Amino acid sequence: MKLSKRQLTIMLLLVMALVLFFQDGEPPYTETGAASYYASSLEGNLTSGGEIYKQDSLTAAHRTLPFGTFLKVENIENGNTVVVKVNDRGPYADDRILDLSRAAFKQIAPLSVGVIEVRIEEVDSPKP
């Protein structure tokens, strides 16, 4: 089947319109600051998002981002990254922007460090 120039132009315009329609146009959320990890004693507790905290999962607490948001977390000192899902509120220490699960923190830094400087970037967020 051969399409005319006009048909190709119309199809191209439709594809472009669909891309623009489904694109939210907002740049991803980014933030830089200190991050720590949850204490092991919180294992099994209910998170603010309604999930059970599991220290072996790749999750995080953030003060304002919607539950279900996925973040790429980069350790600024060594460049290691991990992707986590926001399922809780916090941290409650004023000088921190993120609390990571134990497993997530361990992927980007030794646990013995305790607190690290990170850059976070939203990679996916729940749709309303």
Image (tube, grey):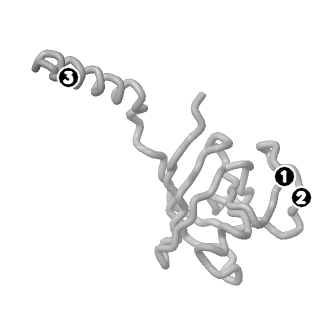
**Element type at marker 2?**
loop
Image marks 1 and 2: residues in contact by CB distance under 8 Å: yes
Which disc number belongs to residue 113?
none
**Residue found at x 50% / y 62%:** 119
Q: Amino acid at mark 1?
A: Ile
**Is residue 42 depicted above or below 76 in this figure?**
above
Q: Which residue is mark 3?
A: 1
**For the residue carrying disc 2, how many other residues have a C-alpha within 10 Å: few (<14), some (14-19), or many (20+)?**
few
Q: Earlier in the sequence, mark 1 or mark 2?
A: 2
Residue 30 % position (x, y): 48, 52
**Residue found at x 53% / y 45%:** 124
**Residue found at x 49% / y 78%:** 78
**Is residue 26 depicted above or below 114 in this figure?**
above
**Label 3, label 1: how many angstroms apart (C-alpha)?**
56 Å
Eye-nearest disc, 3 or 2: 3
Q: Amino acid at mark 3?
A: Met
**Label 1, label 2: how many angstroms apart (C-alpha)?**
5 Å
* Viewer-proximal residue among 109 and 21: 21
Question: Residue placed farthest to the left in the image?
Answer: 5
Q: Which residue is mark 1?
A: 52
| Quadrant of the rendering where the C terminus is positioned | top right
**Element type at marker 3?**
loop
Q: Which residue is mark 2?
A: 44
**Element type at marker 1?**
loop
Q: Earlier in the sequence, mark 3 or mark 1?
A: 3
Q: Amino acid at mark 2?
A: Gly
**For the residue carrying disc 3, how many other residues have a C-alpha within 10 Å: few (<14), some (14-19), or many (20+)?**
few
**For the residue carrying disc 1, how many other residues have a C-alpha within 10 Å: few (<14), some (14-19), or many (20+)?**
some
**Residue found at x 74% / y 49%:** 88
Image marks 3 and 2: residues in contact by CB distance under 8 Å: no
Quadrant assignment, res 102: bottom right
